Image (cartoon, rainbow, N blue to C red):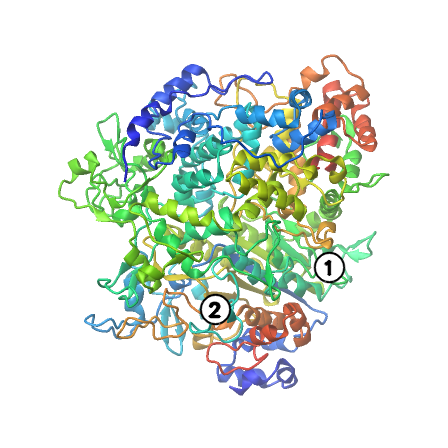
Amino acid sequence: MSHDHTIEQSTAHSSNQVASGDEGEAGLMTAGALAAAALALTACGGGDNNNDVSTSAALGGRAAPMATAITSTWPSWGVPDTAGAWRMANQATMGTTEGIVSQIKSLGYEAWLDAEMAKPAESHGHFLQFDSHCGTNSDGTPNINPSYWSTADYAKRADVAPAPLVGVGSIQRTGWLRFLAFSTWTHANRRPDQLRQRVVHALSQFLVASGKNDVVGFNPQMLSGYIDTLNQHAFGDYRTLIAAVVRSPAMGHYLSHFANQLPVFDGTVTDPTAPPPIKRIPDQNFGRELLQLFTIGLTKLSMDGSEILVNGKAVPTTTRDDIIVLSNVFTGWGYEWRDATVDADGTVFKLDVPYKFAGYYDAVNFTPNPATGLYHVDHNYDGKGAYAESPTGTTAAKTFEIWWMPNHRSRRQAAPMIGYTVFPDPLDPYAKAQNPNRQPVRIHSTDLLMAAQLKKASSAVTLLGKPFSLGATPEESMNKALKIIFEHQNLAPFVAKQMIQQLVTSNPSPAYVQRVATSFKTNQWSMRALIKAILLDNEARLASAAASVTYGRLREPFLRVTALLRGIGITNTNGGIYPAETSTISSDALYLNLNNAQFMAPSVFNDFSPTFKYVGGKMASKGKVSPQMQIATESSVIAYANAVYEIILRGLGQDDDVTNSGQSGYLNIAALVSGNPSASAMVGIINSRLFGGTMSSELKSLTQTAASGTAPIADRFRSALYIAMMSTEFIVQK
Amino acid sequence: MSEINSSRRSFLKQGGALSAAGTVGAPWLLNLSAMADAAAATLTDDYKALVCVFLAGGNDACNTILPKLNEAPFPTTSKRRSSMQRYEEVRSQIALPAAQRALTISTPAGQHPIHPALQNVHRMYGEGKVAFVANVGNVFGKTDRSTPDLALPPRLRSHNDQQGFWQSGRMNSEPSGWGGRFAQQRSFNPTGLPIETRSNKPYADYFRSVIIGSNVPFGMGDANGTDVVRAYGLGAKGDGVIPLLKQTQDGKLFGAASQTLLRQVMRGQFKAPRANLLEQDYMDVQARALDTQAYLSDALKVIPDTSVPEDAQLTKDLLMVARVIRAHANAKGRQVFFVTLDQFDTHGNQNYKHPLLLAELDTALNRFQSALGNASGKVVTFTASDFGRLLHANGDGTDHAWGGHALVMGDAVVGKGGKSVIGTIPSYETDAAGNYVDPQMTGDGAMVPTISVQSYAGALGRWFGLDDATLTSVFNDGTASRLASSVGMPHADGAGVLKGLL
């Protein structure tokens, strides 16, 4: 295990990118705030302790390196027309603006993509934005450092206080998640690197981590770190990106390889082919989904994405033994140990002991000390006793301890995990100081134990049909496993097809998948090549392809609303958008009833499946999938109609944490009607901003009717805008 | 066990067969059918509803029903262990302690504790309204740990595949499900129900299959049928209907345009219809929603909202189901419902999560059964889950396995005491070498199912009133031999034969 990344870390944050103005958008935070936050964040984002140069360069907030020259496999395109530019912007951004359409037209498709890819990734943007909310004082002044509130401050913040801990549902929605919602909505709408935002959104649909998991939901800073990770690697290479996903604490908790440990047998293993009975097995969750959802899928594919059939049957990619091997590979991951936080009262909070290692539950699991009823903290790494009471020492305070503890933990919960071969780390001075006699124990699996779990000789262990042995560290084992996984024939078509579905069309032709997959593979998993191959393909660009009756994708509600806000523009240009989470339709707040949000999927299978067919529908009758129809129910479509009405009327939620208080996400309709446009001129504005001028004549006519009459002009504009928003011409991206 | 052999046909012909069957521990299908319902076990003019409560993520069956009590422990000098010893050993952190083993159920093998969170379920078990079904899951016919991989269903232990399989009941994981196909067999009799003018069918027909939440296969009918059932996706908030633009004051959009424009756009009433099929499908859902708003709003007045904690999602969802049922239970027809309780994928932190989940299930089932009122005899509720979880813990959680335990609830479930656990709970006993004695346990601690999903579903289908031929078509995925082996699969003791449970 290497710890030589400390030096690297000290420079990793030197190039924090202040969100620069683009299309008239102001930065997300002031430069001063960012600098202060960066100082408070020295431990975040480093931790890249493998020797992979491209990985190192891509972490730490620097712009992703230009990949080695990309081999172009896509056609060259001439000067785009408005409709063509608008179509690409729909596929490549979180919402088209007139400015982006102009840019694409003047640069051309490929040069615009190059320009977008050259925009640097923001450093820790989501984490800082999340954290800045955690640190807002009750009087509204920013308080970024220290990164937690006093109990008294917190008590005043009833508006964001989490629900009491009753029942399972309360696991899923806490006030803290509002900070994440603020961050995701604001980034989607305001970041200048729109292609990156859209690619991250696409990745988030199948590299799923979600706030609906209890641990992750209570500690959304993990998710903010995860989103930052996806941002950093969106234009790097997929192999490095997946390695970063492995290291993410959000994923570590979501798919539970965090603190996963070697198998335990009832006796000493000597001959792995005849081991003693097994008592504890390593967690299989991450390894299984890594294969099934993130890399190769379950059945063998041709390069065109179609299933290979042998005697009419699909051929599995994996065996049960493959999953067991990977469960051993992903053992030993936990939070990094540096950066113990000293509280104001001198209490040292070392709360990030991987509690599975210690074999017990620390305060994060809300287990009170049976003797005192207080929640406890393991200061000694020993997993027994040594209860520290909550800071104020009163029963009443225990609730607060639970809630604000995550802020003590937040930095490392957003930073990459460390692979521990043994635990505690012998190099950890804190652990040594606390308990000098504690002997580190091995937690990363060994070849012998892995073989014993498989009841095979070590030399007979395989992964995906290839000989496999573990490395000396979790990091090495991961790299050895990823090497084999990335050699699998499925990887290119599996990832290529999903990305096409997320960006362009739910039902790509096999030839399209094959072209993209080939480019992806040829260019050694370059995300840039993947994105270009997708967006510059004939099937993405040609209007004739888009005219097919089964072409396109139903926009998920999140993307519909970001398209509205970006296309029309919002008033609070300096602020953010601050809704609560929008992933259900049971909220009393109408504008939140989108039944969809980022990073709030109900399970690792996301809100909707890429293979969903809507029975009884016309797409299904043609054998076509329509993934987003999975969340389009008789209730949700009405809830959505109401939500859009509210958003057009009142914006997207109370913006109570931004200095210019008032509504956030409030459409700047006043500016659009200030010149007192005629009804047809209003239709022209909507047509240009939301449809790239492609509105059908019938929709133009309907919106013009809506824009006519004697009501105040802003209301007539809203009326027309609403009709346009509710049309399937808008809802389906083609 | 010739009773198992007695097909439903002969059983129905012999009015006295039920009691005879009951006395000798008949297959659970028979136990499910109350005397009064048995004679009506066809699609005649009555009302019945099936409610699937899906425990998404894979419920940990090993902590739902525990090993039997009072089994002598083996000395630990050898590797030999009793079931409970083994349970405590390989689940060290997450085994339920002895103090939490007070609620028990009876099987011929002995008393088994169930999870202490299941208090209401246990009470209803005592009243004969709940039956447990042991070790049900995805298999082709009789299977144990020695069955070669080739004879096993594909993609075991994968969430979405096993959910898809459970719900579709066909090995090719169709987009349709057996709930929708059940519902497809019987439309509503129009007598007394409001008729939709355009279709000349009762509005109730929209609600033959209802899903609370997102669209899933279970409630979708056969796409090739003449009368395709599409699940109605219902929310569970407020009055149950989310009214369109209730917030507008004067019925006008922003005080300007008429709402008629909106409805026209949502229904896709254009002079030049939209060509794109995604657009057409979406408009079609909107049209269905608009068609039914008034009817549903009226129908759901049957039961006023009762107080439910904001977070008790399953309770809310099931109370909504109860309202839809009570709105239709005096008519004649069939309905299927699908609700989900999520988060059962307890790879970690199981001691915290699993009790909360089972408590929510327990509360919700109890409130639902009460809310049904005098319709309770017409409703059978059952659980399903992706799979069970491995007996062997991974530390603080458990991993994906195979068979699991389900429960069936309703007045139609008969039998008390020893008659309400169907099938056999696998034994965890190990031999002197530390291997499981029971061939239904794999080496890594998964239960190999002894009751197939189709047998389980088929039994429910027969109560619903479907005959054998219909059930065969419902589960037929084109592989006749597989159908025969899985549909006809006997329960645990192996005494049944083909269709014994159908």
Q: Which mark is residue B149?
A: 2
Where does the image place residue B139, in percent across and percent down from the top left? 51, 69
The residue positioned 63% from the left and 86% from the top of the image is B14
Q: Residues within 10 Å of mark 2 (few under 14, many from 20)?
A: few
The front one of A725 and A320 is: A320
In three-dimensional space, the C-alpha distance between marks 1 and 2, rounded to whole angstroms, equals: 36 Å
x and y percent of residue B121 in the render? 45, 63
Side (left or right) of B10 relative to A266: right
Q: Secondary structure at mark 1?
A: loop
| Residue labelled with disc 1 | B228
The reply to whether residue A585 is in sight is: no
Total numbered badges shown on the rendered structure: 2
**Location of residue A403 (image quadrant):** top left
> Which quadrant of the structure image shows residue A451?
bottom left
Residue pictured at 38% horizontal, 47% vertical: A480
The answer to whether residue B406 is above or below residue A403 is below
Q: Nearer the viewer, mark 1 or mark 2?
A: 2
User: Is residue A563 visible from the viewing direction of this image?
Assistant: yes
Residue extending farthest to the left is: A437
Residue closest to the far top: A675
Q: Mark 1 vs mark 2: which is more N-terminal?
A: 2
Q: Circle 2 sits in a helix, a strand or a loop, which is it? A: helix
Chain for mark 2?
B
Q: At which x and y percent is residue B46? A: 69, 69
The amino acid pointed to by label 1 is Val
Hey, what amino acid is under mark 2? Asp
At horizontal 83% and vertical 30% (from top left) the residue drawn is: A697
